[in-house]
Amino acid sequence: MQAAWYSQNGEAKSVLIVGEQATPTPHAGEVRVKLHTSGVNPSDVKSRKARPISDPLIIPHSDGAGVIDAVGDGVSSARVGERVWVWNGQWQRPLGTACEYITLPAAQAVSLPSHIDDGAAACLGIPALTAVQAVHLAGDVHKKTVLVTGASSAVGHYITQLLTLQGAHVVGTVGSAAKAAHAQSAGCKDVIYYKTESVPQRLQEITQGAGVDLIIDMDFATTSQLISAGALKPHGTVVCYGSNNPGDVSINFRPLLWGSITLKFFLVYDLTPEDRHGCVKALCELLNTDTLKHTIAATFKLKDIALAHESVEQGQLIGNVVIDLRL
């Protein structure tokens, strides 16, 4: 099969190789998916650049979509021919979705409604599931004011849609007018240009000095400082799924204590079985009713995977980056 892989950390053009690898055979409890698309996420880029490598080669990417073409023992043959999207394709295993075929546990290949195209389906495993879990952890958001950091990002765009569906007033941080328009298309009521405006000051203006009820955050290294600046109401909550600084983050303890602030962190790859089941079920319901908007910023051929990775690193595109394995 055609695949892309790397065997050492480094820049995309230096380490990514495209060529032939053995086509895998499903083991007991597994399915094999003939992949049509593979999603490229920021975490894929970070892994290629810096995550320690313990296997001879890594086929990157966790998200993708395609058709089940073979099953292992214990899996119904009726699943052969089923369109599916996959999650955690390259979590704690070396062989991800940047290839023509992937084998993985049957539960990680989820039935895909006929009206959802393969490009959109490559956006579900990380961006959409992260959004669903974040909003789940937020609890009741009806009539609450919620700050979504990075509201135009792949995850933030889904979060904004979900919050709006549940009756929240969404305030989003964005980096440009085009990104503001994208966030507003998902339901964002107020936008803050974090590069040129004071986020705490604008939040005070928007909430008449009260602060927001909730922050759903992609960059805790920055957002931790907003709490001290009065961005969050007393008894407010921060739900966080990432940070641009993965190391130590400085945080002022007193505002957390005196404000009775709740912090919730999660890693979308490592949800509890109960949370995973709930998120997949909720997302499937949203897909079945065609409720969500999916945004594909760019589509690449497998041979151009280095360009795809570079486009994600540059952070200028609005929407998801997808590799179409049929091109």
Image (tube, rainbow, N blue to C red):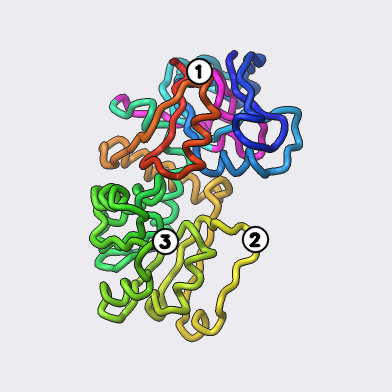
Q: Residues within 10 Å of mark 2 (few under 14, many from 20)?
A: few
Measured as percent of width and height from the top left, residue 85 is found at 44, 30
Amino acid, disc 1 = Lys
> What's the amino acid at mark 3?
Ile
Q: Which residue is mark 2?
A: 247
Q: Gap between marks 1 and 3, in whole Å? A: 35 Å
- Residue placed under numbered mark 3 in the picture: 216
Q: Residue 87, how many percent across, how many down?
A: 51, 36
The quarter of the picture where the N terminus appears is: top right
Query: Which sits earlier in the primary sequence, circle 1 or circle 3?
Result: 1
The amino acid type, in three-letter code, at marker 2 is Gly
Q: Nearer the viewer, residue 43 or 75?
A: 43
Query: Considering the numbered disc 2 on the image, is that residue within a helix, a strand or a loop?
Result: loop
Horizontal arrangement in the rendering, residue 52 relative to residue 45 (left or right): right
Q: Which residues are magenta?
A: 88-114
Furthest-front residue in view?
196
Tell me if 261 is positioned left or right of 205 in this view.
Answer: right
In the structure shown, which secondary structural element does the residue marked by tag 1 occupy? strand
Q: Residues within 10 Å of mark 1 (few under 14, many from 20)?
A: many
Are there few (<14), some (14-19), or many (20+) residues within 10 Å of tag 3? many
